[in-house]
């Protein structure tokens, strides 16, 4: 979506959404942000008890903090980034 906004050329592809591509990309990003946010809400308005609480926000936070610690201590020294353009000879 950022490449479309900046006017940069896109990679070659077999399928294109045409002039509606930017709108479809923006709508899908906004929908996914809303869906992702809603995943962390409790199932009922009074879900503040530990047995009825939605624990997904806690689990997400543990994974994010654990990943950041792993990256800072180990992965940043051994990570090799992806190659942006790869030619595949088929």
Image (spheres, rainbow, N blue to C red):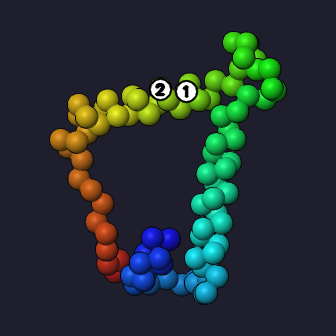
Marks 1,2: beta carbons within 8 A: yes
The correct choice, above or below, for 13 with respect to 58 in the image is: below
Question: As rendered, which of 7 and 16 lies closer to the eye?
Answer: 7
The correct choice, above or below, for 90 with respect to 72 in the image is: below
Marker disc for residue 62? 2
Whether residue 90 is visible to the viewer of this picture, yes or no, is no
Secondary element type, mark 2? helix
Task: Give the quarter of the image for residue 9.
Answer: bottom left
Toward the left, the furthest residue is: 77
**Picture coordinates of residue 41, whole percent (x, y):** 70, 33
Secondary element type, mark 1? helix
Within 10 Å of disc 1 (Cα), the crowding (few <14, some 14-19, many 20+) is few
The correct choice, above or below, for 89 with respect to 47 in the image is: below
Question: As rendered, which of 89 and 59 lies closer to the eye?
Answer: 59
**Picture coordinates of residue 73, whole percent (x, y):** 23, 31
Within 10 Å of disc 2 (Cα), the crowding (few <14, some 14-19, many 20+) is few
Q: Name the residue under label 1.
A: 59
Task: Give the quarter of the image for residue 65.
Answer: top left
Where is the C terminus found, in terms of image quarters? bottom left
**Picture coordinates of residue 22, whole percent (x, y):** 58, 76
Q: Which residue is drawn at 41% across and 78% down?
A: 6
Q: Residue at x 58, y 83 (%)?
A: 15
Say whether residue 85 is left or right of residue 13: left
Say whether residue 20 is left or right of residue 83: right
Q: Residue at x 58, y 84 (%)?
A: 16
What whole-number distance in Å separates the C-alpha atoms at marks 1 and 2? 5 Å
Marker disc for residue 40? none
**Picture coordinates of residue 4, whole percent (x, y):** 48, 78
Whether residue 89 is visible to the viewer of this picture, yes or no, is yes
Question: As rendered, which of 72 and 30 lies closer to the eye?
Answer: 30
Toward the bottom, the furthest residue is: 18
Task: Give the quarter of the image for residue 58.
Answer: top right
């Amino acid at each position: 979506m950022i490449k479309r906004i900046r006017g940069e050329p896109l990679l070659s592809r077999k399928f294109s959404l045409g002039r509606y591509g930017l709108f479809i990309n923006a709508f899908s990003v906004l929908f996914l942000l809303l869906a992702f946010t809603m995943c962390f809400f409790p199932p009922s308005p009074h879900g503040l008890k530990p047995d009825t609480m939605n624990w997904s926000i806690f689990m997400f936070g543990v994974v994010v903090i654990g990943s950041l610690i792993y990256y800072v201590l180990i992965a940043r020294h051994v990570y090799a980034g992806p190659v942006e353009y790869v030619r595949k000879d088929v």
